[in-house]
Structures are given as C-alpha cells and as structure tokens.
C-alpha cells in the first residue's frame, strides 16, 4: 500500500522467487514500482484498491506480510474511521502473517523543517492526520490483531501487528 516511488520494496530483502503484490489507488506508482522491481528475483502483481475498502479478491489471501508505510496519515478521518483498513488487511494475512507500517501522528514535529513540511502537506490536503494519535492507532490495530507493537522514531511512528483476528 502507498507505493510512492517503490523505495522500500526495491531495497527490501526478499526470499528468492517471492511474489510481491502491489496495491494502490493510482496505477502510475504501481507501474513505476513494477519496473523498478524487474530483475530483483520476484514475481510482481498489481491490484487497484483503496485501503478503506476490502482488499480485492484478485489480490489473493494468505500473505506473509502486508506493508503500509507512510499511508495512514494521508487517509481522511480518525483511526476510528480509517482503522477499518487494518481489519481488511487482517483478513488477507496468513494466520502467522505480519502487518507492518509507519505513519506520522498529529503531534508537534520536533524540528523546524518537520513543522514546516507538516504544515505545507496539511495545507494542500496531502496529510489528513489532524485526529491521529497513538491511542487511536493502537485501538484500531488491537481491534484487528492480538499482538501489537508501536514505536516512535523521531517524528515517525512505526507499528507491527501479528495474530490477525477474524
């Protein structure tokens, strides 16, 4: 989810022959990331989808992991609303699968640059994290997973969740 320029996927360690499924609302970053993954020893599939909707059946089920990096702070609403995405991902993960990701919560950035960037992205509508806080993130994750870990690294919040609840 939230492919951007595909940096995380291109630089991730993968098992040889892995199948990587890309999902985004926009086909442009999916095609860009697909091209970047050529020759990286994996099969690449692409599915158009919205994190607020169930994962399309064409994506499949039984994923070992689902990555959601720098996506949730762009999705409108609070975690009470957009947290439904975690339940959608829990449904397609394998029993021992892992959801992992990163987000930017609505907290005062620590640096002047961080504050300026956050203000600019919020002004143009790229950030929709006005109601995002750690309590809401944790509650949304725990509604879909039995095990949840959340860690702050600077202005970024990392999360992982295992044991999907179905």
Image: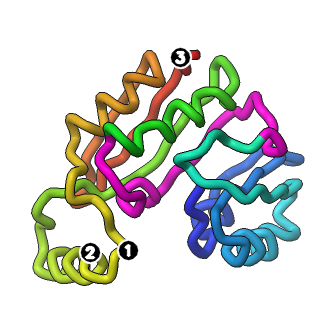
Q: Which residue is mark 3?
A: 165
Relative height, residue 124 to residue 19 (above, below) = below
- Mark seen at residue 20: none
Give the numbered dot on residue 122. 2
Q: Secondary structure at mark 2?
A: helix
Q: From what the image shows, is residue 129 above or below residue 78?
A: below
Residue matched to label 1: 126
Magenta region = 57-79
Give the crowd class for mark 3: few <14, some 14-19, many >=20 residues within 10 Å. Answer: some
- Of the pair 22 and 80, the residue shown nearer to us: 80
**Do tag 1 and tag 2 residues touch (Cβ < 8 Å)?**
yes
37 is within the stretch colored magenta: no
Q: Residue at x 68, y 31 (%)?
A: 92
Q: Is residue 18 above or below residue 34?
A: above
Asked whether the beta carbons under mark 1 and mark 3 sit within 8 Å of each other, the answer is no
- Residue 28: where, in percent of width, then height? 70, 78
Picture quadrant where residue 97 is located: top right
Compute the Cα span from label 1 to label 3.
31 Å
C-alpha span from label 1 to label 2? 6 Å
The foreground one among 4 and 123 is 123
x and y percentages locating residue 24 in the rendered image: 65, 61
Is 72 magenta? The answer is yes
Q: Residue 55 in the image: x percent, y percent?
A: 68, 42
Q: Which residue is depicted at the point 37% across and 58% down?
A: 76
Q: Give the residue drawn at x 64%, y 27%.
A: 91
Left or right position of 5 against 77: right
> Which residue is rendered at x = 64% and y = 64% of the image?
25
Q: Distance from label 2 to label 3 (Cα)?
A: 33 Å
């Amino acid at each position: 989810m939230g492919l951007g320029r595909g940096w995380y996927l291109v630089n991730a360690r993968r098992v040889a022959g892995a199948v990587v499924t890309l999902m985004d609302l926009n086909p442009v970053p999916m095609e860009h990331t697909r091209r970047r993954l050529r020759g990286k020893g994996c099969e690449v599939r692409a599915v158009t989808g919205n994190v607020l909707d169930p994962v399309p059946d064409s994506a499949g089920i039984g994923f070992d992991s689902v990555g959601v990096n720098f996506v949730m702070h762009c999705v409108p609403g609070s975690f009470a609303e957009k947290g439904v995405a975690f339940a959608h991902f829990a449904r397609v993960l394998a029993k021992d699968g892992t959801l992992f990701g990163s987000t930017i919560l609505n907290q005062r950035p620590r640096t002047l640059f961080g504050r300026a960037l956050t203000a600019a992205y919020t002004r143009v509508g790229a950030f929709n994290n006005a109601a995002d806080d750690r309590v809401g993130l944790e509650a949304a994750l725990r509604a879909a997973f039995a095990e949840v870990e959340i860690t702050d690294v600077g202005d970024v919040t990392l999360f992982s969740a295992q044991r999907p609840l179905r």
